Image (tube, helix red, strand yellow):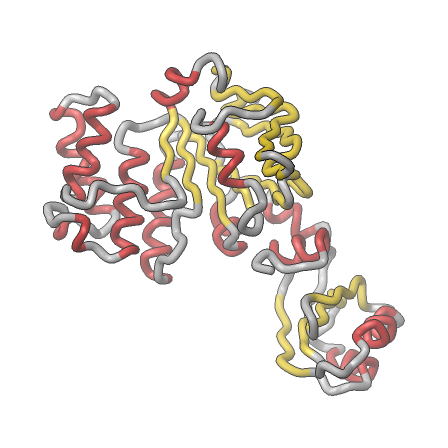
Amino acid sequence: MELAIETKNLKKHFGDIHAVDGIDLQVPKGTLFGFLGPNGAGKTTTISMLSTILPPTSGEATILGNDIRKDANKIKEIIGVCPQEIVLYERLSARENINLIAKMHGLKKADYKEKTDDLLGRMNLLDRADSLVKTYSGGMKRRVNVLMAVIHDPEIVVFDEPTAGLDPQSRRVVWDFIRDFQKKNATIILTTHNMEEADDLSDELIIIDYGKIIAQGTPKELKGKLGKGDVIEFKVKEQVNRDIVIERLKKLDFVKWVKSVGKRRIILNGLDGLRRINEIIDAVEVKMLDISIRNNTLEDVFIDLTGRRLRD
């Protein structure tokens, strides 16, 4: 297996804050690899080190065999980064922003002129290609940032929260674009706190929390660890003792696990839970509010590992 990225005990400390606290990672070449975790988990700090923007405090990392400390210039040639924060030249058009990045990578006009139009068309931006980006909406700007990261056909592309703030339609356009780009055998790193995005796009992913990897596998493998069954979530009134409710639920032979989430929510996994919802209601013995029933999600994996939601 040829590795695109490998890290060994990679760390980044800011004073007493251990933003990245010993990441061991192997990313196979040609995969779409997800970094899933809440804001502040260490995702952006990790990719900032991998893209040579930040020096590590300790540990090792290589990008296609190039050391992030010794071979920074080479890495910058073979990697593309779409940052979490929108970075554009407001007084240039979308086309000019993309072409500027192409020139910075040494591409000739004949090589990027037609390609720029193709990229803009795939992002539904061609009709506004020559408008100044200061006139664009936030979603349009983010789509231009995605294109700037790939104009030079990098072997590895990092998309850091690429759909943050996008409406559902624009999000789908970006998702389709990322999938199509991977077909070129590029290696893609996707950081997100959107569980649907991580589940839908990732070949494999890691879940990061407080600078550490707490789980790794394919989305199917990670969700499979919770077992088969329905996930049932509900709220109780503030005065209800949730510990008592949880103990009652644990006595049901078809309930695999029960968690308390936040101040008033309880979440459980039950085999054939939908059909046996009346037994759950009887066992709880108090009024259940906002009941929802669904299949396992990656957020349920995170809840199982940490006892809280991705967004908490």
At x 47%, y 47%, the residue is: 201
At x 14% / y 46%, what residue is drawn? 129
Q: Is residue 149 above or below residue 72?
A: below
Residue at the spot 61% in from the left edge and 54% down from the top edge = 298
Q: Residue furthest front?
A: 15
Question: Percent from the top left, x then y, of residue 203?
Answer: 53, 40
- Quadrant of the snapshot with the C terminus: bottom right
Q: Residue furthest right?
A: 251
> Quick one: quadrant of the N terminus?
top right
Residue 176 higher or lower than 13, as above or below: below
Query: At which x and y percent is residue 108?
Result: 15, 21
Viewer-closest of 176 and 189 = 189
Quadrant of the image occupied by residue 214: top right
The residue at the point 57 percent across, 48 percent down is: 37
Residue 52: quarter of image: top left
What percent of the width, then of the height, locates residue 121? 19, 46
Q: Number of callouts in the render?
A: 0
Horizontal relation, residue 52 to residue 266: left or right: left
